[in-house]
Amino acid sequence: MANGEKPALSNRQASFSEAFKQFICDDWAPYSSELPVPLPGVVAAAAHRKKLSEKYPGERLIIPAGGLKPRSNDCDYAFRPHSAFTWLTGLGTDREPDAVLVMEPAAGGHKSTLYFHPRVPRSDEEFYGDSRYGEMWVGQRESLEEMAALAQLATASIDDLEPALQKMASQTPTRMLRETDPKLANKLDAWRGRGDKQDAELVVTLSELRLIKDDFEVEQLRQACRATAVGFEAVVRELPNAVGKKRGERWVEGVFGLHARHQGNAVGYDTIAAAGDHANTLHWIRNDGDLHPGDLLLMDAGVELDSLFTADVTRTMPVTGRFTDAQRKVYDAVRAAQQAGFEAAKPGALFSDVHQAAITVIAHKLAEWGVLPVSAEEALDPTDGGQYRRWMVHGTSHHLGLDVHDCAQALREDYRGPLKPGMVITVEPGIYFKSTDLMVPAELRGIGVRIEDDILITEDGCEILSDQLPRESADVEAWMAGLLSQA
């Protein structure tokens, strides 16, 4: 329910007597008069608003945070604002459901106002009776002044939003990020007398402006990678417990999730904790399998910070700390492919060059092992080849930032165009030999390996942001040995 609409009284909740309404208002300590310090991302957010303002002079821009989404009946999923809203306001964690940023055209650019649902007096029934906004239910909310201090933005009550938009909608060209608040979008269409053609362009622009990360964003991604490394280390120390319990994959998932919640906001995406043949299912998030000695564990996980920037890291680890000869053979091939991807990742190279470098190594390894039915060169032919994709289905890279698959609505020619300093992408080749694949030598069946790191494109190459974790097979074993000795 966006824009201040209140839910009806729950059937589970009794009505309040007049005596209670009088009593509940008495004897509360006053709210602090000290204003909060600004959030860490507000300076960067102001710069981001300036970039967006320059794209659309003279136009009103509406960017809602989005609202709560039911998980079951009257229980909602944890709230996460739309990434564009966070990018433009600096508000992360669970701030601020139903809020809307409005950038109003003004002399020299735009005047930005954050409309949200502020704290009400304790004499208001919302304080004790509203499970969506009430302080008794969801904790103390900010006042208009407190939110203005946090976000360094002008603020207004969400109740004032629709009258303000309706008043000028027909005279001022207006664009809106529609997907986050469809009800408001439909009302806006009626007020301005047109549909969403211009709105679609705004979605693209908001993605494209985030392709190049600024210093604040890069530092947030560095911190996310460091936090993620701590989570991986904790998982390795817990591997003996995971092996000893049923559904050990969920033990792995839970340990990492604990560290993600402790160090940041949450996991940046559903953790993949895939042991044995499960590693050959690319998006294995059921995580209901056991861990067995001799298995590999493919773990794809990332910590999302309070700023909502996330890491995205994969390591494939031998459960008991030592690779078998067959596992090492596959692992080292994937690692060589990743290194080729690193070396291809530099300014001016095409986004696809990273993938091409990695799959060239993989195709030649598959041919060397007698797995490919054709030569490596034939498999790499873009017109008639592709046979290697049976064992390496996915792309090698994607952009990374506030979203794990960041900037996904950018134009294809920009997303996949030349790499530029400030872009952050992943490099994540893999080889996946399903246990049921009869084209694969028996000793390799059931082995799945992916190695993934996050890199920043620099002026002369790339910086590996996730270099806290080892990549070479011997280094992985030494790293694990040290951690397992602490278990």
Image: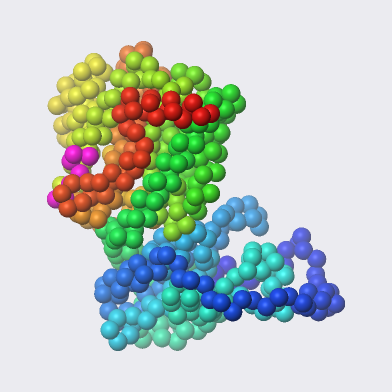
Q: Residue at x 77, y 63 (%)?
A: 13
- Vertical relation: 388 (above or below) 15: above
Q: Position of residue 182 (x, y in %)?
A: 47, 66
- Vertical relation: 398 (above or below) 20: above
Q: Residue at x 81, y 79 (%)?
A: 22
- Vertical relation: 297 (above or below) 162: above
Q: Position of residue 426 (x, y in %)?
A: 30, 44
Inspect this view and state whether residue 345 appears: yes
Res. 124 image quadrant: bottom right
Q: Residue at x 45, y 71 (%)?
A: 38
Reply yes or no: does residue 344 show up in magenta.
yes
Task: Name the residue at the top extreme.
Answer: 442
Reply yes or no: does residue 140 show up in magenta.
no
Q: Position of residue 349 (x, y in %)?
A: 15, 47
- Vertical relation: 350 (above or below) 431: below
Inspect this view and state whether residue 437 appears: no
> Which residues, given as a range, are shown in magenta?
342-348
What is the number of callouts on the image?
0
Res. 232 image quadrant: top left
